[in-house]
Image: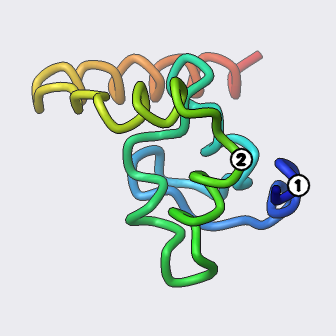
Amino acid sequence: MTEKNAHDEREIRCPKLGHELTFAYCRREADNLPCPRIIRCWESLFPVESFLRDTLDAETWDAFCRQAPPDKMTSLLDLIEKAKARRQADRT
């Protein structure tokens, strides 16, 4: 079995959030499930799907595969809230 933390320090620009993130974040972004975009974002850097299959148990892999992406409006509202929070944090 592959070590779960093997790629955690790698970084990539997140198209969803708009800044650099580590693989560790992407691996547990969605309520301790991998981000729904993890395979699409990381597949050019290493065999991420194989890595996830090796490191996730069958139940977690199934839950990951069943994740429904949020609708566009929900995504936009979530991004707006995160941007507001980031701006507020920058002011303090």
Q: Residue at x 63, y 33 (%)?
A: 57
Q: Which mark is residue 55?
A: 2
Between 50 and 84, the one lying in front of the other is 50
Q: Quadrant of the N terminus?
A: bottom right
CB contact under 8 Å: marks 2 and 1: yes
- Mark found first going from the N terminus, 2 or 1: 1
Q: Residue at x 21, y 26 (%)?
A: 70
The amino acid beneath tag 2 is: Thr
How dense is the environment of label 2, judged by Cα within 10 Å: few (below 14), some, or many (20 and up)?
A: some
Secondary structure type for disc 2 = helix
Answer left or right for 41 relative to 79. Answer: right
Q: Which mark is residue 3?
A: 1
Q: Is residue 65 above or below residue 73?
A: below
How dense is the environment of label 1, judged by Cα within 10 Å: few (below 14), some, or many (20 and up)?
A: few
Number of numbered discs: 2
Quarter of the image for residue 60 reads top right
Answer left or right for 39 relative to 90. Answer: left
Q: Position of residue 90 (x, y in %)?
A: 70, 28
Q: Position of residue 31 (x, y in %)?
A: 55, 17
Q: Quadrant of the C terminus?
A: top right
Alpha-carbon distance for marks 2 and 1?
7 Å
Secondary structure type for disc 1 = loop
Q: Position of residue 18 (x, y in %)?
A: 48, 53
Between 33 and 23, the one lying in front of the other is 33
Q: Residue at x 57, y 52 (%)?
A: 53
Q: Residue at x 39, y 51 (%)?
A: 37
Q: Position of residue 64 (x, y in %)?
A: 43, 33
